[in-house]
Amino acid sequence: MRFNFLSFTFTLHCLIKHNLFFLLNKITFFSFVVLFLCLFYQSCSNLKSIHNSKRSKQLSLTNPWSKTKKDHSEIYIYTSKSHFHFKFTVKDSNIIARKSEINFNGIGTSDRVELFLACDMQLKKYYGMEIDPEGRIHSFKAKYYRQFDFDWSWPNNALTINHKIEKNGYVIKGKIKLAYLDSLDLIRNDNLHIGLFRADYYDKEDNTKVHWYTWKDPKTSSPDFHVPSAFEAFPIRY
């Protein structure tokens, strides 16, 4: 591990704060070194998390087709040395995750967040994941315009998803290996071309009633996220 003076200082602070120096009289020198290294490692991890939070980009969603519909969800995305990370914190007091749906891996008419990644802004090739509040994933690959391959799916060793249902919404958090994205030719000139969307169904009895939200306004007359204008380049930084 490369020496980090800030982490070293923080570790000493932890030792003093928790009055751990008195252990020097009661434990061996070797045990104290082990304790110190554990605290040092934890300090590095904490500082790394802080660094990542500063590097992350906070985004929001809008509904261009209804000026009265506001979305208060938050999205954070960033890249580390090995992964592309994303987190959707959705505000929704009426979560709908239907069990009887058979299309799109069971989430075709359920609330969900959506992440699309394209190889370019012409959508010659792009890949999508749609995730409902219970963590069910619908995957696809496609090319413009709406030529889908629903037999394709994200491999388990490349994608990690965590989900949590809360009192007033749900959280979807995930990461994708950059090496896998690169193998799909999705990283070009240190950029990812991404689209971020959300489906909010609001009537449990009528599965056709849904509000659509998007990061970028695609400038379409009705909701359509399979067009180049719904995507934007996101630079890879770590």
Image (tube, rainbow, N blue to C red):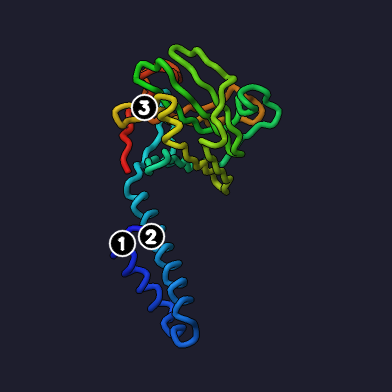
Q: Element at badge 1?
A: loop
To which residue does mark 3 refer?
193
Height in image: 232 above or below 85? above
Q: CA distance from mark 2 to mark 1?
A: 8 Å
Q: CA distance from mark 2 to mark 3?
A: 31 Å
Q: Element at badge 3?
A: strand
Height in image: 55 above or below 45? above
Q: Amino acid at mark 2?
A: Cys
Q: Quadrant of residue 125?
A: top left
To which residue does mark 2 refer?
44
Q: CA distance from mark 1 to mark 3?
A: 34 Å
Instruction: Evaluate if marks 2 and 3 touch, with contact meaning CB atoms under 8 Å apart.
Output: no
Indicate left or right for 64 with 26 as reference: left
Indicate left or right for 160 with 69 as reference: right
Instruction: Evaluate if marks 1 and 3 touch, with contact meaning CB atoms under 8 Å apart.
Output: no
- Residue 42's label in the rendered image is none
Residue drawn at x 36%, y 27% is 193
Residue drawn at x 44%, y 84% is 24
User: Mark 1 Cα within 10 Å, few/some/many (few <14, many 20+)?
Assistant: few
Instruction: Evaluate if marks 2 and 1 touch, with contact meaning CB atoms under 8 Å apart.
Output: yes
Residue drawn at x 39%, y 54% is 49
- Residue 4's label in the rendered image is 1
Q: Position of residue 6 (x, y in %)?
A: 30, 64
